[in-house]
Amino acid sequence: MYEGVVQDLIDELGRLPGVGPKSAQRIAFHLLQSDPVDVRRLVSALTEVTEKVRFCSVCGNVSADDLCRICRDERRDVSVLCVVEEPKDVVAIEKTREFRGRYHVLGGAISPIEGVGPDDLRIKELLTRLADGAIGEIILATDPNLEGEATATYLARLLKPLGLRVTRLASGLPVGGDLEYADELTLGRAFEGRRLLDV
Amino acid sequence: MHVTHLSLSDFRSYAAVELPLEGGVSALIGPNGQGKTNLVEAIGYVASLSSHRVPADAPLVRIGAPRAVIRTAIAKAGRDSLVELEITPGAANRARVNRAPVPRPREVLGMLRTVLFAPEDLGLVKGDPDGRRRFTDDLLVARAPRFAGVRAEVERVLKQRNALLKSAGASIRSGRGDVRTLDVWDSHLATAGAELLAGRLHLVHLLQPLVRQAYREVSGGQGEARIDYRSSLGEDITVDTPPAERSRDLLAARMLEALARVRPRELERGVSLVGPHRDDLVLQLDFGGTQPSPGGSGALVPAKGYASHGESWSYALALRLASYELLRADTSGDGDGEPVLILDDVFAELDTGRRRRLAELVAGAEQVLITAAVPDDVPQLLEGARIDVMGGEVRRVR
């Protein structure tokens, strides 16, 4: 145990995801030995984040304003909507530069163990967005784990009757990887999702 | 296949131990509490990624140590390989094969196969269904490691589904809740559950004649053993159902039907009432008229309750021997499916006849590891290498 404030700092850092007690201690001492200017920059970044950042009123992504950058962008294709679990998934998909439609962030996945049901996700907001009929295709891009799959199945059943094209991201082999290193489940999915080669 | 070397660090009572082994019979001899079983438990762990004694990993790590390491050198199909497992309670375990890390410990399943006989096996016959389900699933995974994933998936779906049934049960019954979420979990349970069920049915179908044969040999003639599978989906699903009628798709459809049928009761009780977790491996004995049968209709009686202590032991041994035969005959992969036989303290539990017959049955195996408190517990037929285990030290004496 360290004295008062130092221990408080270590405890706070230790509550962050992916930071264990040892790492928390290392970060704390790094901060103590850093230039106070650098530390103040971190402090002001933290303050600004808590004060300024909110969630986009349309898609639920993190945003500095009422509407996020993507929802404001007129050049985006309004007919395709990609449904993801978390804001960080938006960033991941944006990096591909393949998708030109808009997003909808659910804020999690269905998981009864954690007490998360459909009502706790931004599904009502999703249905509201569909009301004007501008959206023709929904891409379900939830995580390929049990909870993500369950959420995708739930949404597919909810959206199909509305006459929309509902698609799910493919699961399969990582690009640049070796077939022999894929686990059986992934390989099995890759077989299910195989497609015709256009030559 | 056989284990040529076992090395432990901070595993159970051992800070560090090196144990060279060879094919044939090796007996680990020492008084109780000296660490004999810990050695064979470690070998069993490498084969199944679980202990035969405890459900969690924490007790496997020496008190005060952060993690345990098991290293086993295995000779299989003429090739040597080294499997290393690092067990860290509360964190993900890590594995290396031939010094190269593998992405998931599950990848080492299939590198080593063991069939372990232990005093706890009596519970297979006398105990609850969940021990028998574990027996079936462990064997399924040993034969086809992909079932480790299926089994884990079924467990995860059940946890989520039960959590939903408990929390939402009340609100759904009062009409406020959303039944569609439950539909989603039903479909996931049906898909994963049907795959596990199909695997089990096929396995028990293969095991049935082997258990009958092994029981005959161990018991010395009294009665016939018959194993069956009881599915919570209905009595018409048995091991005799033709493969075409128990395909994954058909079983999944049956499971959905059954789930729809029991839904009101599930919501009331807050648990999943249909699925592979409610099934049982049925162990029966057929006395074929040599004894008066209860009920008078047939001579087939459940082993649990009707079998004597000796008959129960014969049954437990027959299940393990049948597992051994099944794995040995499996030449998929590199063609060397023969498991290492581990007899942990079992001879002391058996009468002279069963002891002798078991010794005869296992004497020809590629590698047999025996633990016993006193040398006299090891039948003469199984004389081989002898290793004394005393206070955490191992010493080859013969």
Image (spheres, helix red, strand yellow):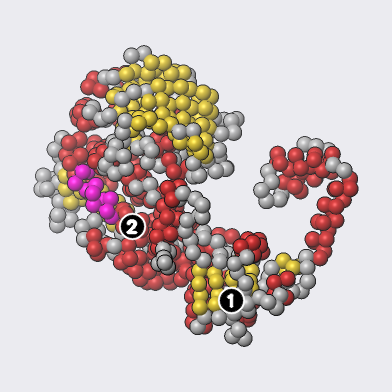
- Residue A80 numbered tag: 1
Provide residue B390's location: percent of width, then percent of height: 44, 18
- Which residue of the protein is positioned furthest toward the bottom in this rendering? A132
- Which residue of the protein is positioned furthest toward the left in this rendering? B289
Residue pictured at 34% horizontal, 23% vertical: B22
* C-alpha separation, residue under disc 2 versus residue under disc 1: 40 Å
Provide residue A26's location: percent of width, then percent of height: 75, 39
Location of residue B320 by image quarter = top left
Q: Nearer the viewer, residue B10 or A178?
A: A178
Q: Is residue B330 left or right of residue A184?
A: left
Nearest to the eye among marks 2 and 1: give it: 1
**Dot 2 lies on which element?**
helix
Residue B328 visible in the current orientation: yes
Q: Nearer the viewer, residue B90 or A88?
A: A88
Label 2 lies in what chain? Answer: B
Which three-letter amino acid code belongs to the residue tagged 1? Val
Mark 2, residue position: B197
Residue B179 belongs to the span the image colors magenta = no
Q: Are marks 2 and 1 on the same chain?
A: no
Q: Which SS type dominates the magenta stretch?
A: helix
Location of residue A76 by image quarter = bottom right
Tell me the crowding category of disc 2: few under 14, some 14 to 19, or many 20 or more residues within 10 angstroms, Cα based.
Answer: many
Q: Is residue B82 left or right of residue B234?
A: right
Which residues lie in the magenta part? B201-211
Say if B80 sits above or below A196 in the image: above
- Which residue of the protein is positioned furthest toward the top in this rendering? B397
